[in-house]
Image (tube, rainbow, N blue to C red):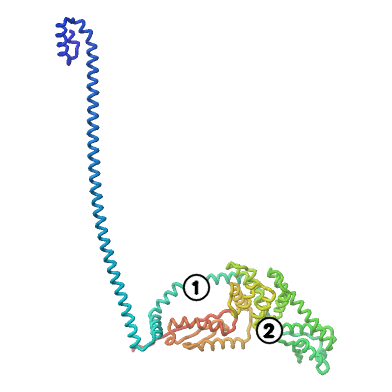
Amino acid sequence: MCKANLPKGLADWAELVTFNADHTDFNCMAFATDQSTISVVIFFAGMMVAYAFSKWRASSIKAMYEDRLKNEIELARREASLETSELQLKVESSQREAGRLLALAQTEAEAVAALKTANEKEREFLQKEILRLSGLKPDEAKRLAFESLQKNYESEARRLREENLDRPEQETEQEARRILITTMQRLTTTTTQDATAVSVSIPSEDMKGRLIGREGRNIRTFEQSTGATLLIDETPGMVLISCFDPVRREVARIALERMVKDGRITPTLIEDFVLTAENEVTRHAQHLGHEAVRDLGLPPMDIKVEELLGRLHFRLSSNQNTLAHSVEVAQVCAVLAAEIGIDPVVAKRAGLLHDLGKAIDADNGLTHAAAGANLLRRVGEDPRVVNAVAAHHREVEAESLFAPLVMIADSISGSRPGARSSTLESYAQRVKNLEELVLTFEGVKEAYAFQSGRELRVIVDPVKVDDFAASELLRRLRSAIEEKLSYQGNIKITLIREQRFTDEAR
């Protein structure tokens, strides 16, 4: 019964204990008491065995893992060493190949340099031989070669010009046209200036005799005092005053009107009337000049300058009032300056004063541009304004943008429709001079001027003038017209080169 309570695995061990107990006089009760102690001992022994086994197993697995890791590291090291060796071999091979190629390149470079030297010597020898055989000098040979190249690459040069120059020129022309149109649209000026004869009405025909005076002394005194010619003819109710100087003509008109109104006509009174008229014209000129400066929003100028500006009111340029023209040029200059971003005040002063020399008496044969510039320089005017006045007819070089602005504005004011009028004789002379100048150029067959000489069409000989020479001829024509002719506005030049080949099939 005691053996039945033991585990099956310990049956043999229990029998051995029982046998020993029997021999040592242990009884069954004492054995039963020790069974629990034995079980605990056996349990802890099993636990210790299991723990020892697990520790052994873990240490074995760890040792196996470490051995495997060491093997893998060693294998990776060997593979890396092998790859490094291969890369070193490749680098050494590449270096050897690069050295070989470098040596080959150096050899080829030396060969090329030697060949180039030989070619240079050969070329120099051939050039000397060619010059010796042809009998030409180096400058002549260079000129012939240049002409040959020019002829061979003429079409290519035209193509490059069209690509590189024509497009920017067209864009610039469009922008300039826009600015000019904008400027002209913003102006409000008188379109025409009437040209009328200077005449003075008289109350009766008896006044003509009194104006002549005894033995003509009254008319002689009048003409000597005014510098004008008094024309008394059979025209009823009026007499005419003729004088090339418009200011003197105005003085004579005022003096004559006052003489007729007063009725007393003697040489002494004539001189008094003329002196009074001169003072009145001077004051009126100062007033007109001051008003022009003030209307343009400019600060007051020198009294002499304002008086000369006012005297421009009495002068006409192709029937255009010169003071009105100057004011218009000043306005155009100011708007153009504002459009291109420069000082409009300086531009306005230059435009207003550009024709000031026309009111100055002839001084050492100077042109009106030079005379006006000299006066403005003496009164301390801005150097930019002085240069613009002196250069507006291209007599001197322009030193700033204000001179070209004055040229453009002067052209706009003088060339707009209806601004100026001209006689048939002046028109014919202008057209004749223009055509004769163009016909003096070699290669020009015919020349025709249209639109009052503002458009010129030139027909050239296609055999003597090729396409390249035609563009050069056009440039020379433009330069000659600008230098040798005096004209208002612009002249459009159209050069025509046409070659026709006609045959008949039968």
The alpha-carbon separation of the residues under discs 1 and 2 comes to 42 Å
Residue drawn at x 35%, y 86% is 131
Q: Nearer the viewer, residue 220 or 447?
A: 220
Judged by depth in the image, the label closer to the viewer, 1 or 2, is: 2
Is 144 in front, or is 242?
144
Quarter the C terminus occupies: bottom left
> From where the camera sits, is residue 187 visible?
no
Amino acid type, residue under disc 2 in the picture: Asp
Q: Quadrant of the N terminus?
A: top left
Q: Secondary structure at mark 1?
A: helix
Residue 42 percent coordinates (x, y): 22, 16
User: In the current view of this chain or complex, which residue is farthest to the bottom?
Assistant: 215
* Vertical side of 180 occupied by 432: above or below: below
Q: Are marks 1 and 2 in contact (CB under 8 Å)?
A: no
In which image quadrant can residue 242 be found? bottom right
Mark 1 or mark 2, earlier in chain: 1
Q: Is residue 203 left or right of residue 145?
A: right
Q: Amino acid at mark 1?
A: Glu
| Crowding at mark 2 (Cα within 10 Å: few <14, some 14-19, many 20+) | few
Q: Which residue is disc 2 drawn over? A: 363
Could you say whether the residue bearing mark 2 is in a helix, strand or loop? Answer: loop
Question: What residue is drawn where x is 59% and y is 82%?
Answer: 487
State whether residue 220 is above or below residue 412: below
Name the mark on residue 270: none
According to the image, label 1 marks what residue?
169
The answer to whether residue 117 is above or below residue 242 is above
Of residue 132 and residue 253, the one placed in the foreground of this image is 132
- Residue 486, percent across and down? 59, 83
Q: Residue at x 50, y 70 (%)?
A: 171
